[in-house]
Image (cartoon, rainbow, N blue to C red):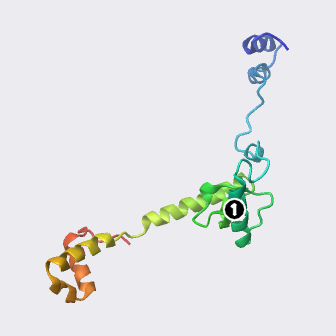
Amino acid sequence: MSSESPEQRYKKLRKKGLAPKLAEMLAYQAPPGTKGTDRAFWDGRLSAFDGMHPVNAAKLRAQAAAAGIDINGKYYVGQLADKRGGGDPKAWVSDRHDIKKAAEIVEAQRIAEHLKPKPRLNPRIVERIAARMIKQDPAQALRDPRELREEIIEKHGSKKAPEP
């Protein structure tokens, strides 16, 4: 093995007429990057359950089997899963395209959830205020609960109507 530094090797290779990028690659013994390729995605992964506790791996296999998901040649990405965990088909990916597609679905769901109309007043707050009103005036308990709720929301809720 040579004791010369990568910088020295680079200078020698440049003097021999090699292009700067090729000389750099050879001097530092670093091949071009493979970021964004399927090879980079699978690099270092032997199976879908590498480094996973056997109990957790068995749980994921059982969830996938119960959901009818074929996990052969696929890798589990928990960040893409919904509350079904291993039973969520988009969490089982075979390449970077699957990950991109699943991530787009997750992002679209997140945006849709964010765009849902929000209540003018949290239902728990409405119930708490109603309980306080009934405690102060027991006759309030005889009122129609919908009317009581609407009155509370009108008085304490946001003045702006929720957007559709």
Horizontal side of 161 relative to 105 (left or right) equals: left
When asked about the image quadrant of residue 10, the answer is top right
Q: Residue at x 80, y 57 (%)?
A: 73
Q: Which residue occupies the foreground of this view, 121 or 29?
A: 121
Q: Position of residue 5 (x, y in %)?
A: 75, 12
Q: Residues within 10 Å of mark 1 (few under 14, many from 20)?
A: some
Q: Position of residue 43 (x, y in %)?
A: 76, 43
Q: Which residue occupies the foreground of this view, 99 or 135?
A: 135
**Quadrant placement of the C terminus:** bottom left
Q: Which residue occupies the foreground of this view, 115 or 87?
A: 87
Is residue 44 positioned above or below 164 on the image? Answer: above
Q: Is residue 88 visible?
A: yes
Q: Is residue 120 visible?
A: no
Is residue 133 positioned above or below 86 on the image? Answer: below
Q: Residue at x 21, y 79 (%)?
A: 151
When asked about the image quadrant of residue 55, the answer is bottom right
Q: Residue at x 69, y 63 (%)?
A: 59
**Quadrant placement of the N terminus:** top right
- Label 1 is placed on what type of residue? Leu
Q: Position of residue 102 (x, y in %)?
A: 64, 59
Which residue, given by chain and number where applicable, does mark 1 sit on?
Answer: 60
When asked about the image quadrant of residue 123, the answer is bottom left
Q: Secondary structure at mark 1?
A: helix
Q: Residue furthest front?
A: 55
Q: Position of residue 51 (x, y in %)?
A: 71, 47
